[in-house]
């Protein structure tokens, strides 16, 4: 996240998204969430399994209608985001990383 421009943090411009997953305790299903930082628009997709390929495909599916409004996406360092290069390429955007410090 240190490489992410400071103006993204200010939430003054549209097109900067944050993505994460919510994991089910009972099975391998999960939700992928995408939040646009300025407008607070939320997109949610259901994953049958929290794999990198399924996560990549769902993020592309959810953001394709907003492709012109995707300037950057920030993810945590979960392995489900390992195919971020394909997301960057398809959506013509930049991916930044937020590393949890517990």
Image (cartoon, grey):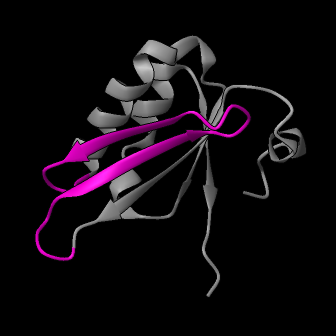
State the residue in front, 39 or 27.
39
Q: Is residue 31 magenta?
A: yes
For the C terminus, which image quadrant? bottom right
Above-or-below relation of 45 to 75? above
Q: Position of residue 63 (x, y in %)?
A: 44, 25
Q: Position of residue 12 (x, y in %)?
A: 86, 32
When the figure is inspected, residue 31 is found, relative to residue 42, above or below; the finding is below
Residue ID at (42%, 64%): 78
Residue 20 inside the magenta-drawn segment? no
Quarter-wise, where is residue 24 in the image? bottom left
Q: Position of residue 75 (x, y in %)?
A: 54, 53
Q: Which residues are magenta?
A: 25-51
Residue 62 visible (yes or no): yes
- In this rendering, is residue 13 above or below 6? above
Q: Residue furthest bottom?
A: 102
Q: Quadrant of the N terminus?
A: bottom right
Residue 91 pos. (x, y %) = 49, 21
Q: Is residue 62 or residue 88 the one in the foreground?
A: 62
Q: Residue at x 36, y 44 (%)?
A: 83
Image-based side of 58 in relation to 101, left or right: left
């Amino acid at each position: 996240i240190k490489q992410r421009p400071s103006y993204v943090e200010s939430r003054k411009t549209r097109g900067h998204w944050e993505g994460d997953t919510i994991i089910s305790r009972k099975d391998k299903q999960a939700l992928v969430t995408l939040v646009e930082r300025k407008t607070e628009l939320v997109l949610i997709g259901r994953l049958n399994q929290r794999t990198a390929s399924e996560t990549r495909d769902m993020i592309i599916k959810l953001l394709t209608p907003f492709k012109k409004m995707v300037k950057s996406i920030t993810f945590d360092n979960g392995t489900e985001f390992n195919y971020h290069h394909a997301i960057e390429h398809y959506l013509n955007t930049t991916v930044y990383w937020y590393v949890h410090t517990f």
